[in-house]
Image: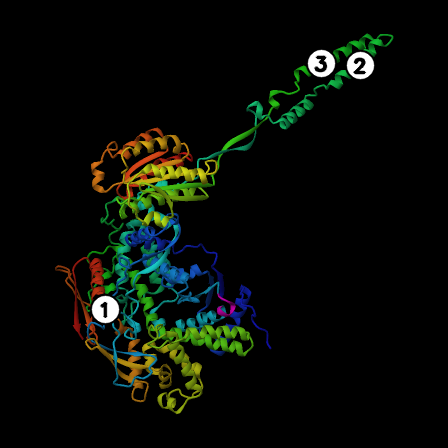
Amino acid sequence: MTHFVDRRLNPKGKSLANRQRFLRRARAQIRDAVQKSLKDAAVADIGKERKIKISTKGTGEPRFRLDPKASGERDFVLPGNREFMPGDSIDKPKSGQGGGGKDASDSGEGEDDFEFTMTQDEILDIFFEDLELPNLVRTTLKETPNKKWQRAGITTAGSPTQINLLRTMRNSYGRRLALKRPTPKDVAELEEQLLAAEQETPVDGEKISALKERLARAIAKRKWVSFIDPIDVRFNSFTEQPVPTSQAVMFCLMDVSGSMGEREKDLAKRFYMLLHLFLKRRYKKVDVVFIRHTHDAQEVNEQEFFYSRQSGGTIVSTALEKMLEIQKARYATADWNIYAAQASDGYTQSGDARTCVEMLNQQIMPLCQYYAYIEILDEREMEVFASEDSGAELWRAYRTVASEWDNFATKRIAKPADIFPVFRELFKKAEGSHG
Amino acid sequence: MADYLFTDSEWDFATVERTYKAIEEIALNDLKLDVYPNQIEIISSEQMLDAYSSIAMPLMYNHWSFGKTFAREEAMYRAGYSALAYEVVINSSPCISYLLEENTMTMQALVMAHAAFGHNHFFKNNYLFRQWTNAEGIMDYLAFAKKYIAACEERYGHDEVEAVLDSAHALMHQGVFRYRRPPRPSKEKLLEKRRRRAQYEESAYNELWRTLPSGVEPPAANPTTAIDEDFGGEVRLPEENLLYFIEKNSPTLKAWQRETLRIVRNLAQYFYPQRQLQVMNEGCATFVHYTIMNLMYDRGLITEGSWMEFMHSHTSVVFQPEFSDRRYHGFNPYALGYGMMNDIRRICENPTAEDRDWFPQFAGNGDWIGTLKDAWANYRDESFIEQFLSPKLMRDFRMFALYDKAEASTFKVSAIHNDDGYRRVRSNLARQYDVGTADPYIQVTGADLKGNRTLFLSHDMHRGVPLHNQTKELVLGHIERLWGHDVKLEERAA
C-alpha cells in the first residue's frame, strides 16, 4: 500500500525555468548590482560566482493588506507577559516592525533587499551584455592556437628521414616470404649442385640443363621480387596538434596622471577584466602585472593601480621600458605568452610618441601575442575625433604601429560598449582556428 | 530489551520501511488515526528547496516569483541562516511526504510520524479540507495547469502570460469563496470539460495564426463550442471573489487568460483552508509525532540516544519566544497547537478543579484520543482556540492582550492571564486567527457593463482599519490590467 520512492536521481535543476524567469524579470536591478559588485572586484575575480544584492523593486508581489498603523483600532495577544497589569500603557515601537506591534496575520509583506548567489555564467552573461559582445564570441572563448607536432601513426608517404624501418622491413619480409623470393643461400645451393653435376661422370646433360634453368629462374626472381619494394615502405606520421600553452602574462599599462578620472579608470578596468577573462579561458595560469605611469613608471598592486592618484607629467615610453624590464627579468618568451593592454587618455609629452613607436616596433611587438591600446575619451571628444585618422600625437603614432602589426589593436572608447571591438581581432582568431 | 528498529544514524530503505511499519502500527492501533494511503519520497536538499519555493507543490507551473523564493531560500540556506524544512507534505491522495536525504534515521522516523500520519490524518478528517479541497484531483489538476501555462507561454509569449499571472497572484487572497461553497464539478464533468478543452486547443491550433500580429485572437474552430460558456453569465452582486468575478465578466480577457485566472483561483481555493488551519494542522502533526515517538521509546523500539535526538529537535520546533525577544515573529503555530493538544490530553486524564469548571464536556473523561479526534475533525484555528484554550495554557504562555488605537502613542494592556482576563485574551487570540477578519474584506459592488465599464469595488473596514496605501495602488493597477477599464475602490466604515 505504501510506496517508497527514491527521487534523488530525478533530473536536477527543476527550478531553473523559474530562476531564468526571475533573472529576466529583475534584469535591470541585477545588472546594476552586478556592475556595482564588479566595480569593487579585482580584475582576476571576474568570472567567479558571487553574491548579488538587489532591491525588491520590480519583483514585488503586492497584495491588499490592512494597515492598522494608519487608523482604526484592533486587539491582539502576545506571549511572554512579565510585569504588565490590565490598564498599563506600553509605548509603541518607534518604526518598522520591531517589538510586538506586529501581529502574525499581517506579516509576509514588506521584504527589503535580498541577497542571492549568481553563478559564473549568469554574471558573465550580464558582463558581456553590457560590453555588447557578439553571441558567437560569448560562447567561443576558445583554446589557444599554439601548435605542437605529435605522432599520429604510420603513413605510406613522407620524407626519407621519417622512414619507419621496422615497419618497412616487416612488410618487406612478409612480401618476400609470400612471393617465395629465393634467398642468396638458395642460389648458392643451386650453384653448388650445378657444379657437382658438371663434375659428375658420366655427364647427365638433362640434369645439368634442368639445374641451369632453375638457377637462372632463381636469379631472375631475385631481380623482379626486390628486397625492398616501394609498397613496403612506411613513414612515421606527425600532425599538428593545438596545445594550450599553460601560462600567460598580462601587462596592464595605465596612465594615472591627473587627467585620468574615476570614469576613465572604470572603463579601463572593464577593458582589463575582459582581457583577463579571455586569457583565463585560454591559459591555465594568468599572471597580471600592473604598471602605472606618469612621467615615471612603477609596478604596483591592483589596489594602487586603480585607486591611487599621482601627479606629474606623462611620458608613456617609461611604462614600455618598465614592461620590457619586467618581461626580461621574469617572463621568458619561451614559457610565457605575453599580452599587453594599455589605457591612456592619449596625452604624452611631445616627442615621446616617436620613442614609443620605435620601442614597440623593434622590441615589444616581436614578443607580444597581442597588444591592445585604448584611448579613453569623453563623449564630446568622441565626436570631435570622429575619424580614425585624426587624433592626438600618441594616437597617430600608434596608428602606424597598427598598420604594421596584425596583433596590435587600437581603439577609442567612451562607453562600455566600445570596449569589445578592441578585441574583435583577438576573438576572430580564436574562432578561425576552430572554424 | 526488545530489538531496536535502528541503532545507527545512517538510514537505508530497508530500515525506513521497517520503521514505517512500526509507526503505522502505533498510529492506526494506538492512536486510531484514519489516513490516506501514504507515498514517501526521498529527495535531495536541492529538490527540497525546489518543492517549497513553488509553494510546496511539486508540479507547479513556472513563474518568476518561485525563482525568487528559491534564490532567497538558497542564499539563506547556504549562509546557514535557516535550516531546511525536514519535510514537505502534500494534501493529496495518496498523501505524498518528502523526506530529506540528509536526515538521520531518527529524523526520518520523526518526519514520517509527523507528516505521513499527523498531517495525513488531519488532511483526511478536518471538515474544511473535506469540504473545500479535492485531494484526489489536485495532482491531476496541477499537471493540467502546468501544461496549460506552458502552452500559453509558447503560444502567446512569456511576457503576456507573466502579466496575467502577476495580476492574478496579486488577487489570490481575494480569489476565494469564503462563505458559499464553490461549485465543485463532479469528476466526470471535470474530465469532460478537460477533454473539451483539449479538443478546443487542438482544433483551434493552426500554424498560420502564429504569424498574426499580437492581439489578434484566432477564432475558435467552431464558434458554438462553448469554451466561453461561463462568460457573461448572470452578474450576482456583491461578489467577494474578485478573481471569479473578473474571470467571468471582464470585457477584455481572452479565453486563455480566463482559464489562467481560473487556475490561480482554484489554487487559492485549495490553499484557503490551510491558511485557516495553521495552528491545528501543525499542532496535530506535532502532537502525533510526539506521542508516537514516545510510545516507540517506551516499547524499546528506539534507543535512548535516538530519543534524545528526537527531543532536541522537538523542543526546538515547539519553542515560543517571548514578545520582547528578537526572535519573536508572532505565535509559533507548532508551539500553540501542540501546547493546546497536549493540554487537552492532560485535561482528559488529570483534570484540575479549574479544568472541570471550564471544560465540563470532556474534563476527566479519559478518552483523549476521541476528544482530540473530534477537535481535529470539526474545528478550525479560530473556533478551536475559542473552545479549547485553557487558563493553564494562557498562564504557561503568559498571554496578555493589547488594545491598539492608531492615533494613540501607546498600546493599552486590556487583559492578562488572570481570572478577569482569560475570556478576553482567549477570544482576542481566536479573532487573530480568523482569516476573515485578518484579510481585508473587499467585494465587487458593481460593474457598469453597458456604459463605460468601470468596475466598482468596496472595502468594508473592520474597526476602521484601512488598506495599506502603497500596496493598494499597486494591486489596483493589477486589477485594472485584468479588467481592462477603470477600477474604483471605495473604503467604507462597516
Position of residue B451 measured from the top left corner of the image (x, y, whole percent): 12, 60
Amino acid type of the residue tagged 3 in the rendering: Ile
Viewer-closest of B285 and A379: A379
Amino acid type of the residue tagged 2 in the rendering: Glu
Mark 3 closeness class: few <14, some 14–19, many ≥20 residues within 10 Å = some
Q: CA distance from mark 3 to mark 1?
A: 116 Å
Mark 3 vs mark 1: in front: 3
Segment colored magenta: B103-107
Q: CA distance from mark 3 to mark 2?
A: 14 Å
Q: Is residue A358 left or right of residue B255?
A: right
| Res. A219 mark | 3
Viewer-closest of B238 and A415: A415
Q: Secondary structure at mark 1?
A: loop
Q: Chain of mark 2?
A: A
Position of residue B253 measured from the top left corner of the image (x, y, whole percent): 22, 56
| Res. B240 mark | 1
Q: Chain of mark 1?
A: B
- Residues indicated by labels 3 and 1 sit on the same polypeptide chain: no
Image-quadrant location for residue A374: top left
Mark 1 closeness class: few <14, some 14–19, many ≥20 residues within 10 Å = many
- As drawn, the residue found furthest toward the right would be A201
- Residues indicated by labels 3 and 2 sit on the same polypeptide chain: yes
Position of residue A193 measured from the top left corner of the image (x, y, whole percent): 81, 14
Which residue corresponds to the image point at 60% horizontal and 22% vertical from the top-left?
A231
| Magenta-drawn stretch, dominant element (helix, strand or loop) | helix
